[in-house]
Amino acid sequence: MRYRALAALALSLIVASTSGVADERDAWAALVNGSHVALIRHGNAPPGSGGDPPGFKIDDCTSQRNMDERGRTQAQSVGEAFRQHGVPVDRILSSPWCRCLETARLMALGPVESVIAVASSEQNPELFFVLKQLVTGWRGPGTLVLVTHAVTVRALVGIMPEQAETVVVRPRLDEAGLDVVGRISTPR
């Protein structure tokens, strides 16, 4: 009996690790084919979760929670991975928070546009509606890259990504919705 339980556990771990690899492969393939959206959480910004300090100002990076060297390296690695996979990037939109803008710029995939709606969630319904319209309306031909926050990704697709993790979604052609294609792990 114990042998069966151990065998079942081992098999489930193999299947779980293989599905994660397949998930990443599907995500990269979708990005290479274009007409998808890459939702990228900013690079490592200690303490790792939570918001900005009280009294922060959107136009003053010194008042915000910012990336550290690990986060900067992650951002550069994400950009390098996009180039290595040959992802055609049409547009890069970033939350105006400094950690997102810095991530997007360090990825070095093209010009970065600062868009307040990319920082939205259900807490600000008007902006979140604009963001949803932007994402569900994307038709390419290349990839739309959004550098944003975990709460924004969670509000859009129900996934709370790690810092510098990418969630790849496909806008539905027949309705205003999204399908999650896969996730690309945080660079190590």
Image (cartoon, grey):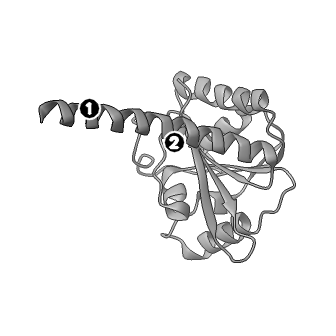
Of the two numbered discs 2 and 1 on the same chain, state the one appearing first in sequence: 1
Provide the secondary structure element on which disc 1 rests: helix
Image quadrant assignment for residue 129: bottom right
Calculate the distance from the C-alpha at mark 2 to the C-alpha at mark 1: 53 Å
Residue positioned 67% across, 26% down in the render: 76
Q: At x 60% / y 70%, what residue is drawn?
A: 128
Residue 26 place in picture, x, y as percent: 65, 44
* Relative to 89, 159 lies left or right: left
Q: Is residue 73 above or below residue 152?
A: above
Q: Which mark is residue 7?
A: 1
Type of residue at label 1?
Ala
Q: Which residue is mark 2?
A: 63
Q: Secondary structure at mark 2?
A: helix
* Figure check: 85 above or below 51: above
Instruction: Give the image location of residue 29, x and y in percent.
Output: 72, 42
| Residue at the image position 53 percent from the left and 33 percent from the top | 186
Q: Position of residue 71 (x, y in %)?
A: 55, 29
Q: Seen in the image, is 151 located left or right of residue 25?
A: left
Residue 83 visible at all:
yes
Q: Which image quadrant is residue 74 in?
A: top right
